[in-house]
Amino acid sequence: MEIQKAETQKTQMQTAETQKTQMQTAETLKTQIQTAETLKTQMQTAETLKTQMQTAQMQKTQIQTVEIQKTQMQTAEIQKMEIQALSRTYQVKRIKAPDLPAVFALCSGNPQYYRHCPPFVSLESIQEDMDALPPGKEMIDKYYLGFWDADRLIAVMDLILAYPDKQTAFIGFFMTESAIQGKGIGSAIIEDACSYIKLHFSNIRLGYVKENMQSKNFWEKNGFLPTGAMSKTESYEIVVMEKALS
């Protein structure tokens, strides 16, 4: 009887051990299943993030495409600019090499300007001005123009389109023949130019040498106001002005 009892206890212990092992196996399987579910969720999350990133990239590409198309349309519009429309009174033409002596004669007749903005004008400096561009601009954006009364050059304007932003035109240089100054002719040229430029741009900007009160008074008379921005060179300080083209 004792032997049978011992055998029974042994069997019970083995059964209990087996059940314990089965429970541990079941627990392990449960953990593996949970781990697999977690991995599945993580993979789904990663896939969702991937899809979101792809969607965001597509949206970014679409926005960039729209911006490019917008820029192309603005460029195409700018290229349609009719320079003669800048004046209702005078013939407007791009300054070319044969015109340089006429430009030199006009500019050299304004020594006060060069006292504030040295060095004095030369044929070489005029050519440099004709070729000069601000950062990010191309020659297609630049109009170095002469305003002519028959064969007489009465004004020169350096006009940069879409600078410093897409809604702004920039007058880099404007000068009239000294003989017509004080008669309202320069103001009339600026008024006509602004009337046409506003068809393409919202603002027009320029700069004058701070010490040049004649320039300051002229531009203020024509509706230009200081922006608060200034820039410096080795020889002088430039006050930036702007006019809203309504």
Image: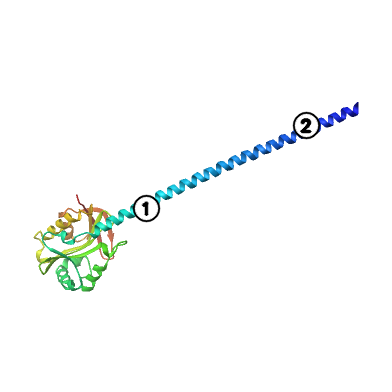
Q: Residues within 10 Å of mark 1 (few under 14, many from 20)?
A: few
Element type where label 1 sits in the image: helix
Mark 2 or mark 1: name the one nearer the start of the chain.
2
Question: Residue visible at 69% across and 36% down?
Answer: 26
Can you tell which quarter of the image residue 96 is in?
bottom left
Could you say which is closer to the camera, residue 187 or residue 39? Answer: 39
Question: Residue visible at 55% across and 44% down?
Answer: 43
Q: Residues within 10 Å of mark 2 (few under 14, many from 20)?
A: few
Question: Residue visible at 23% across and 53% down?
Answer: 203
Could you say which is closer to the camera, residue 108 or residue 54? Answer: 54
Residue 48 screen position, x and y as percent: 49, 44
Taking 119 as reference, is 151 left or right?
left
Amino acid type, label 2: Ala
Amino acid type, label 1: Gln
Question: Residue visible at 79% across and 32% down?
Answer: 15
Taking 232 as reference, is 183 left or right?
left
Taking the view exactly as shown, the residue that stands out farthest to the left is: 183
Q: Is residue 163 visible?
A: no
Residue 229 screen position, x and y as percent: 27, 55
Taking 54 as reference, is 157 left or right?
left
Could you say which is closer to the camera, residue 48 or residue 228? Answer: 48
Can you tell which quarter of the image residue 71 is in?
bottom left
Q: Is residue 177 above or below residue 165?
A: below
> Label 1 near label 2: C-beta < 8 Å?
no
Q: Is residue 9 visible?
A: yes
Element type where label 2 sits in the image: helix
Residue 240 screen position, x and y as percent: 24, 57
Which mark is drawn over residue 13?
none
> In which quadrant of the rendered image does the N terminus lie?
top right
Which mark is drawn over residue 64?
1
Number of numbered callouts drawn: 2
Task: Give the residue number, with chain letter if any, for mark 2.
Answer: 16
